[in-house]
Amino acid sequence: MTPIIEIKKLNVGYDNKPDVLKDVSLTVYDNDFLGIIGPNGGGKTTLLRSILGFLHPQSGSIAFFDEGHKVPHINIGYLPQINHIDKKFPIKVGEVILSGLTLRGKIFKRYTAEDRRKVLPVAQKMGVDDLLDRAIGELSGGQLQRVLLGRAIIDQPKLIILDEPSSYVDKLFETNFYKILGEINQDIAIVLVSHDVGTIISQVKNIACVNQSLHYHCGSNISQEWLSGAYDSCPIEILGHGDLPHRVLMQHDE
């Protein structure tokens, strides 16, 4: 396996929260499908923002690699949480997908004919090719999720990061969505953040729990003992599925 991201002894904090992440080390590989779980306030979003370059670490390092060679950055696609999307913004589905080509360039750019030709095959892959002229405000949660996923992959990134993707989708579409992710993972590494442990363990290849520090588990067959240890010192509980016990959500001071 070839690494595309190496995080070493990362420490990140804010003025009022000096130790959001402490001594975090993690490697993401070129064929990875990594699930990240953890309690609210444990640092999952902070880790994502650090990888995306929105936050600078207090100490430690984040290195990027392309075919084994260290590079300043790699192309990363990002699927944000749905509550960060303004569905009232007057933009069509095709334009949203096309806008993924601006992520590594300028915010405002003139799209070429070649750029525009990339939209249809991506929309077909996402199953939204019949919605290209529809405004995003008219879409269901599942449709919007597929459009934003298309936006994340149109520029052929090395990695896509998905932040709580299940928040978009009802259970009827969820299986189809993860089938699409499985197909994408044949060519693109995936980091998926979710509070839903049941979904994570049934879909991903490897698991990490972020709760200030990071606990890594190679493989998706996690035990109750590992899960309890990863969540140690935090009063929050989560809802597990399958062989994991169902546990009650408790109050958590962030």
Image: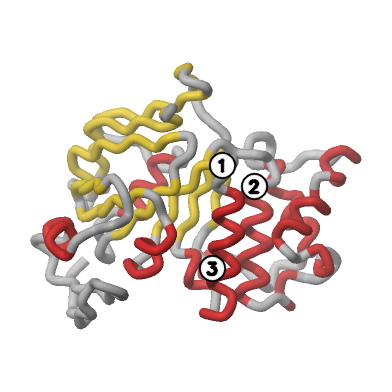
Which quadrant holds the C terminus?
Answer: bottom left
Q: Earlier in the sequence, mark 2 or mark 3?
A: 3
Closer to viewer: mark 1 or mark 2: 1
Q: Earlier in the sequence, mark 3 or mark 1?
A: 3
Q: Is residue 182 or residue 142 the one in the foreground?
A: 182
In the image, residue 194 lies at what x, y percent? Answer: 38, 63
Alpha-carbon span between mark 3 and mark 1? 22 Å
Name the residue tied to disc 2: 153
In the image, residue 248 lies at what x, y percent? Answer: 20, 82
Asked if disc 3 and disc 1 are in contact, CB closer than 8 Å, the reply is no
Alpha-carbon span between mark 1 and mark 2? 9 Å
**Amino acid bearing label 2:** Ile
Name the residue tied to disc 3: 82
Height in image: 136 above or below 13?
Answer: below
Q: Residue at x 81, y 63 (%)?
A: 129
Height in image: 88 above or below 15?
Answer: below
Q: Residue at x 61, y 75 (%)?
A: 141
Q: Secondary structure at mark 3?
A: helix
Mark number, residue 188: 1
Q: Earlier in the sequence, mark 1 or mark 2?
A: 2
Which quadrant holds the N terminus?
Answer: top left
Q: Secondary structure at mark 1?
A: loop
Height in image: 98 above or below 132?
Answer: above
Q: Secondary structure at mark 2?
A: helix
